[in-house]
Amino acid sequence: MNATVATSVFGIFMVATVALGLLATRGRRKGNGEGGGLAEWSVGGRSLGTVFIWVLMAGEGYTSFSYLGAAGWGYNYGAPVLYVVAYMSCGYAIGYVVGPMLWAYARKHGLVGITDMVAHRFGRPWLGALVAVLATVFLLPYIQLQITGMGVVVSTISYGAISLNWAYFIAFAVTTGFVVVSGLRGSAWVSVLKDILVIATLGFLAFYVPMHYFDGYGPFLDRLVTEKSEWLTFPGHGDSGLGQAWFITTSFLNSLTVVIFPTTVAGYLGASSADVLRRNAMLLPAYNVLLFVPMLLGMAALFVVPGLVGAESNLALFQLVVDSLPAWAVGVIGVAAALSSIVPMAVFMLVIGTMWGRSVLSLVPRWERRQKGAAQVVVVAAGSLALLLTYTAPNTLVRLSLISYEGMAQLLPMVLLGLMWRRLTLLGAMSGLVVGVGVVCGFVFTENDPVWGVNAGIVALGANLAVALAVTYAGPRERDDRPDDEVLARDEIGAPEQAAELDGAPVGTGH
């Protein structure tokens, strides 16, 4: 009976999710111009306002990891999980400057992603294709992360009636169903429903769990300090190697990486103006307060469901929910967690499709004029591949997200430094990228992460940057006949007026 009630609630909301995504496309223009075609599908026609950009980018940041992985890390280690709050908050501050800068550059030159920007900056279409392939490799684990997370949620809230394998397929089918048709705008609309449910359910759980299991926060925190003090200091519980140096380097690396993550850039480019992005950067940190709830409840589960090991720890929060709440409430909380997988998964798949449709398949004459159709085909292919990886190569949630970030970080010199510094040569950027990717893969696949107590990705990024600079200064200076405004001018950084003027709107005040 419980399984029937919970899955019925879940099913109703999933139908509503697909319908909402499809409804988002109603009345939108067709064609291949700036207001339709690939630009409309991939960046919402560059017309999303503050509210939609806020829920979309908050939805991308608050994923299934936040419900499952954060609780699992709180359960396993404790304090090290706070790196998530640290890097996201710092990333929003960096995004206040970088977001409008990328938005202005992309809007001026009609670009729809980082592969476009790199290809345009260095004047090499094949470079955009190369970056698209590399970014796809590091984004696929993140899609797999969301499929795994949603699968765990669906199987758990069904009280085991739906197997993990079927739950994984449901995650893939629902997401693919609406993102292929509705694109970024549909994801933004679904994010509104998701955020309402996330805020409501986590707000409820933040009060319910301590009261139900411990008679309040006082007894819970007193017991945590007395019996589990190891969870409250670095490096946390056990021999994790996640000490202060790891925390600082991971927070720093991820805060830089998140601003050029292809999905973040998609959010930037969907904005209607640069001021929308600045307001968004100031509002987004408020959403981080919600991250403390699953972290704290993961530690609460230490006393309620002890003995969870390995990937089982990701179920720490939902064990508390399933064991104490009625089936309908389990279903609603499950929907909130599932939507926390669907929204970011949709954006990841959309971005991969856009990169390939714009930078890879467009090199083939047959597909050059059918970029949107090519992108939609790639969305289905990327989702199918991630689903296959979920079945054949499962992994823990946090490990998958760290691989994505450490690999994507190696694009920082080529993307950010390349756009801000005209002296960087193609050979320098490429040499650094090869070294950085090689170093990070070497560390990760030999299980030497952390290395020397720090994040392996930042070691690789240091090598990447050193090689890029050395090759640039040692080699010949590349001839660049483009006018100065073809590359980001130095005074564009932190200049709201210049970015706003590109939008054709009056300059905002108070920023």
Image (tube, grey):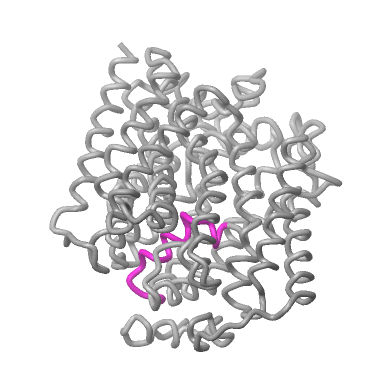
Image position of 102 with respect to 490: above or below: above
4 is higher (above) or lower (below) than 427: above
For the N terminus, the image quarter is top left
Q: Quadrant of residue 371?
A: bottom left
Q: Position of residue 232 (x, y in %)?
A: 74, 41
Please say if 33 is above or below 247. Answer: below
On the picture, is 266 further left or further right than 404? left
Residue 75, how many percent across, how many down? 65, 31
User: Furthest residue to the right?
Assistant: 452
Q: Position of residue 181 (x, y in %)?
A: 24, 46
Whether the magenta-drawn stretch holds residue 265 is answered as yes
Q: Is residue 186 left or right of residue 354?
A: left
Q: Is residue 159 above or below residue 302?
A: above
Q: Which residues are magenta?
A: 258-274
Nearest the viewer among 223 and 231 is 231
- Relative to the observer, which residue lies in front, 35 or 99? 35
Query: Which residue is at 66% across, 75% downward?
Result: 424
Camera-side residue of 410 and 457 = 410
Q: Where, by quadrant of the figure, is residue 316 drawn?
A: top right
Q: Residue at x 17, y 60 (%)?
A: 30
Q: Residue at x 45, y 76 (%)?
A: 105
Q: Which residue in the rendered view is the most extreme toward the left? A: 27
Q: How many marks?
A: 0
Examine the structure image and report whether residue 446 is included in the region drawn in magenta: no
Residue 380 locus on image (x, y percent): 35, 38
